């Protein structure tokens, strides 16, 4: 009997971010006026409220906007189908285009989207934005994430720009055997200025040590950005 995860199909809801579902959070309830935005991208089968629990522990230099996946997955949402078909990037490309359009809408209102924090599928999507345009975001945080497993036309440009990226993951994550873990590490080293926070006894989750690493990484990005 196979131990491979069993996945349900995804269903496209709309090829655009549902603005009514966006959850905007500012740490400590402070004013968000003029602050750059960090987008939060949830994992498979989750929803826009999921990652907002991280926000109280993150720097108040930013405000945070959590987006809902554009695909329905069981009782939650997704950004693309699983298992991933390397020959079929259409779903993640549709999600990336939806997030790009949302970011452009923010820019039209004078709001700067600085970076993204994504968990699992959301991490893959954050990286996909940079693979499409290395200037789409200033930096990303990949939590138990991975690159879409196929070359993309923008990979060479991404390697040249090499934006900052934090990769946080667990050594006991059942979705990452040693070979896959090393493949993700190699890709991020070749295409970003990667910082790695590996928690040896952590599974497919985020712990307090990883959360502190995320907060410190964001604080450094805020300090390095003249817009913060």
Image (cartoon, grey):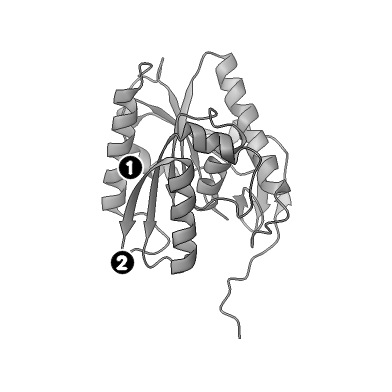
Q: Name the residue: 72% across, 56% down.
A: 87
Q: Is mark 1 on a helix, strand or loop?
A: helix
Rendered location of residue 26, percent (x, y): 38, 28
Q: Where does the N terminus fall, quadrant-wise?
A: bottom right
Give the distance between the C-alpha atoms of the residues marked 2 and 1, in whole angstroms. 18 Å
Rendered location of residue 220, percent (x, y): 29, 31
- Please tell me which residue lies in front, 134 or 216: 134
Q: Name the residue: 42% across, 65% down.
A: 173
- Kindly tell me whether residue 170 is visible in this rendering: yes
Mark 2–mark 1 contact, CB under 8 Å?
no
- Please tell me which residue lies in front, 188 or 215: 188
Tell me: 50 left or right of 171: right
Tell me: 99 left or right of 38: right
Q: Is mark 2 on a helix, strand or loop?
A: loop
- Labels 2 and 1: the sequence-earlier one: 2
- Kindly tell me whether residue 119 is visible in this rendering: no
Q: Name the residue: 37% across, 26% down.
A: 62
- The residue at which mark 2 appears reads as 201
- The residue at which mark 1 appears reads as 214
* Neighbourhood count class around disc 1 (C-alpha, 10 Å): few under 14, some 14–19, many 20 upward: many
Q: Is residue 172 above or below residue 164?
A: below
Q: In this view, does 156 lie above or below 6?
A: above
Q: Where does the C terminus fall, quadrant-wise?
A: top left
Rendered location of residue 128, percent (x, y): 58, 42
* Neighbourhood count class around disc 2 (C-alpha, 10 Å): few under 14, some 14–19, many 20 upward: few
């Amino acid at each position: 009997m196979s131990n491979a995860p069993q996945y349900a199909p995804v269903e496209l809801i709309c090829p655009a971010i549902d603005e009514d579902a966006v959850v905007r959070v500012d740490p400590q309830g402070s004013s968000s006026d003029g602050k750059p935005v960090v987008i939060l991208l949830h994992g498979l089968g989750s929803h826009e409220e999921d990652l907002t629990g991280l926000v109280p522990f993150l720097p108040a230099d930013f405000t945070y906007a959590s987006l809902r996946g554009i695909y329905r997955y069981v009782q939650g949402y997704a950004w693309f189908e699983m298992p991933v078909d390397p020959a079929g990037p259409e779903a993640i490309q549709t999600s990336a285009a939806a997030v790009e359009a949302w970011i452009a809408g923010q820019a039209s209102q004078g709001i700067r989207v600085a970076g993204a924090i994504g968990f699992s599928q959301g991490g893959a999507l954050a990286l996909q934005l940079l693979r499409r345009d290395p200037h789409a975001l200033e930096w990303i945080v990949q939590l138990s994430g991975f690159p879409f497993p196929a070359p993309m036309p923008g990979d060479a440009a991404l390697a040249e720009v090499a934006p900052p990226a934090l990769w946080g993951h667990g050594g006991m994550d059942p979705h990452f055997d040693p070979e896959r873990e090393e493949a993700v590490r190699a890709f991020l080293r070749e295409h970003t200025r990667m910082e790695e926070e590996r928690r040896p006894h952590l599974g497919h989750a985020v712990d307090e040590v990883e959360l502190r690493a995320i907060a410190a990484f964001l604080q450094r990005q805020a300090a390095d950005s003249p817009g913060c």
